[in-house]
Amino acid sequence: MTAPERFTRSTAVSLAVATALAVPLLAVAPAAALAAEASAAVKAVVAYDKAHTKKGKAYRIAYLTECVDNPYCLARLEGLKAAAAKYGFTYKIFDANFSPATQAKMVQNALAEKFDGYLFGPAAAQPGCGLYNRLLKPTGKPVVSIDIAMCGDADYTPGLAATLTMQGPMHFDNFLDEAFKSCTGTCKVAAVGGFVGSDLFTYWEGAIKKAAAKYPNVQVVVDEPSNFDPRIALKKIQDAMLAHPDISIIVSSWDDMSRGVEQAVVASGKVPGKDVMIFSGGATKVGVAKVKAGTWASTMAYLPYQESYYGAVALMMALEGKPLNAHIDEALLPEILDTTGTVFITKGNADKYTPNY
């Protein structure tokens, strides 16, 4: 993966699509070829979806998801529903509720029902890797993973029909780089992230450390978990502003938390968007509206709807003998490349982007 904002569409779209559809993509490629491979995978899945006009065989799909009850996961469920309506497959939800132990039981239950394929959202990367290798892979049925990479792989794990990600280490690296490079003098930063111990929080923390090392003029004075909860973010940033009233940048990995961040900034007597710049993640309807109003500096697009929709499309391709066997970087999907051309939604491009959750 490379910086999403630097990707451009190839002039050889038809050739890449034809090649990708005719021959399964290589699971292992030289580092220099990874970006081209990912681009070909995106073009192939989008072309397949555009070409599909009628319902085919009624496949039965197991949706092995880590969650269904927050805005991100609900949007992802809507994407799966839309794909099922178009392609005619049925699905059954096996919800792990973010618990690897529960997910292990859910996978075992799903295997007993002998589905045609599996759409797999790991509750955690390493336990998910074990479930894939020990239980899912031996079935010989196609498996598409979504949300996070597994098995220590940067993106695609060999054997999967496809992997779709939007919040990997490189995505968060780009997020923090975008925020920190906005500092033209010296700046103090406060950061709020998700759940301690989760893969996403680990990625987030790693990105903060990299950005701090790259930009010595930026000092991270507060770095706290806030469990994706606006109330916790409000309290953490209130405390941060009291201890460091000269904080000028706040980074938050989720738009809901950023609502609490904004309240804390206002409560401190500062003006968000003027005295304090807020960089958020999600590009939800609320987040994009805040950016348009100039209250937040930017919000980075996550694509939960497209994640499951194109994940299901990739699964249909595999079931029909045309597996991608590759990584799909969601930052390269048409919802980004054909609108803003970048995952960073700012006041300058927000009118081009339409959030669906």
Image (spheres, rainbow, N blue to C red):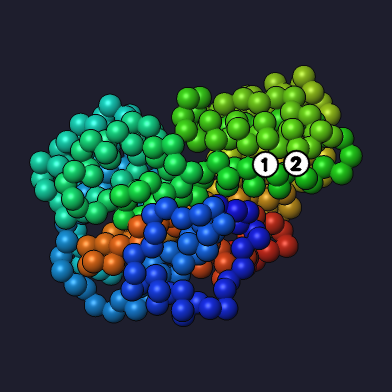
Q: Residue at x 53, y 78 (%)?
A: 12
6 above or below 228? below
Q: Does the residue at mark 2 contact the one at mark 1 (Cβ under 8 Å)?
A: yes
Quarter occupied by residue 327? bottom left
Q: Amino acid at mark 2?
A: Phe
Comparing 66 with 45, the one in front is 45
**Number of other residues with Cα within 10 Å of mark 1, as a class: few under 14, some 14 to 19, many 20 or more:** many
Q: In the shown orientation, is residue 3 left or right of residue 52?
A: right
Q: In the shown orientation, is residue 29 left or right of residue 278?
A: left
| Numbered circle sitting on residue 55 | none
Residue highlighted by disc 1:
176
User: Is residue 122 shown to the viewer in this render?
Assistant: yes
Q: Residue at x 39, y 40 (%)?
A: 150
How far apart, in angstroms, are the residues tagged by discs 2 and 1? 6 Å
Q: Position of residue 158 (x, y in %)?
A: 35, 48
135 above or below 243? below
Q: What is the secondary structure assignment of the residue under circle 2?
A: helix
Quarter occupied by residue 269? top right
Q: Residue at x 27, y 35 (%)?
A: 131
Q: Amino acid at mark 1?
A: Leu
Quarter occupied by residue 325? bottom left
| Numbered circle sitting on residue 180 | 2
Q: Residue at x 27, y 38 (%)?
A: 133
